[in-house]
Structure formats: C-alpha cells, structure tokens
Image: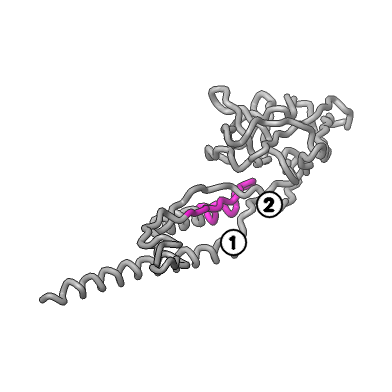
Amino acid sequence: MNSQQMNLDVIANNLANVNTTGFKKSKIEFQDLLYDTKKIQGAEAGDGQLTPGGIQLGHGSRPVSTSKVFTTGELVQTDERLDVAIAGDGFFEVQLPGGAQGYTRDGSFKVSADGAVVTNEGYQVVNAIPNIGAEVSNIGIAKTGEYTMFDQQGNNIGAGQIQITRFINPGGLQNVGGNVYQETPASGVPEQGNPGQNGFGELAQGYLEMSNVKVVEEMVNLIKAQRAYEVNSKAIQAADEMMQRSNNIKR
C-alpha cells in the first residue's frame, strides 16, 4: 500500500505539470521484497526424490527509483523571438545563485535590465546570446544555433553561436525545481556542442517545448494504482477477519 501511495504521488505530480514548459514526466519502478522460504526448491522428498518446487511467501514491494522520461514534448509555436525549443537531445545551461550550474529544457527566455538573456527565474543563460542592447530590434536564431542581431534598419550588428549541453545519463540528473536540473555523479559530466551536430538536438526559434505528459495515459495509470491500493487494503481486511475467526474458535 505504501508503494501504491508513492505511485499515486508520482502520477499526481505528472498531471499537475501537464502545462509546465519543458517538463519531463516521471516513472516509478518497483522491486519485490525478500521472501519467507518455507520449503527450498529441490529439497529431499524421500527415496532420493527432489521436490520440483518450493514454498516462498512474498512480503510486498518497494519503490527503487523515480526516473525522468526524456522524450521530446510537443513543440508549440509562440512567435516570440526569445522562445527557443530543443528538438532532440540537450539542455540549456544556466547560472544558478551561488555560482552553481543548472540545466533546463525550458526555453522561454527573457531579457534582463542589463541586457542578459535569463530564464523566468532570472537565471542567466550560459553559452547563449551574451548581451542584447537597446539598439537590437530583432534576433534570428538558426536550427544549428547561429544567431544574428539586427537593428531597426535591418543592419547586422552582432552574431555568434549558441551551444547546448547533454549528458550520457540524463535520468541521473537531480531535479531541483523551477524547471532546472543539476549534475550528479550518476548523470556523468556535461558535454557541450552545437545544436544539430554530433547527436545534439536542433533549435526552433519561436517555439516552446510543452510537457511530455500524456493525460490519458496518466489517468489510466491513476486508475490502476487506485485499484491496486484498494485491493491491497481489502486483502489486509480479509486476513484480519480470518485471524479473528481463528481466535473465536476456542470460545
């Protein structure tokens, strides 16, 4: 029942973030617990015969991991010049308070008061457009990460290259909230590269990546978890009633 309660919590969090930009759904994985062995498989049965099977009683299940599923969500067009989605593998690197590095799939960027490109939380985006001055009227970002800035007359006033980051095991990243992940020993070291090259995903300017949560799929999982919880509670109730009947025999 504890396992199914945690399963419900994971499903509820997925459904709560169905409209969260760049959100990756979680999946919970279980293992069975140790078994109480009443009879060992292959035990002596007399006359040199061995029992073909044994008797083992399980003690339930336990959750062993809640891992993120990093499939690409639907790309929705916004036509905002600093909305950028990654179609494929990769993260945007951001500077967190205290100097730590974070990684996000949320490309709904803004311009700060000093011209830096930042996230909705105010974290500066690293390896992106360094500074956008007041004279910049428009920005063009290619699929491969090359960007060009234009003034009001359409003149090219700056260009550069946006890089993104990937990990050999993105499922090992630590989710710290705010659409941000952090590196862990399980994720491996970050690898930087240009979009669209060597397996890195391409950029899509004017688009945002939506959550990869599928509501119908999560609702089915919710019903299954609810029924499993209900059946387990009835099994406990039935076992209690059986023990009660046994205790009443001597009366």
**What segment is highlighted magenta in the picture?**
13-31
User: Which of 1/38 is in front?
Assistant: 38
* Quadrant of the image containing the N terminus: bottom left
The image position of residue 132, as x and y in percent, is 74, 27
Question: Which residue, given by chain and number where applicable, does mark 2 sit on?
Answer: 73
Q: Quadrant of residue 82?
A: top right
- From the top left corner, tell me how far across and down residue 133 is, in percent: 75, 25
Left or right of 110 on screen, residue 143? right
Residue at x 75% of width, y 28% of height: 129
Tell me how far mark 2 sits from mark 1, CA to CA.
13 Å
- 116 vs 107, nearest the viewer: 107
Please tell me whether residue 55 belongs to the stretch shown in magenta. Answer: no
Q: Secondary structure at mark 1?
A: helix
Q: How is the image coloured?
A: one colour
- Residue 215 is labelled as 1
**Quarter that holds the C terminus:** bottom left
Question: Which image quarter: residue 124?
Answer: top right
**What's the residue at 56%, 47% (across, down)?**
67
- Nearest to N terminus: mark 2 or mark 1: 2
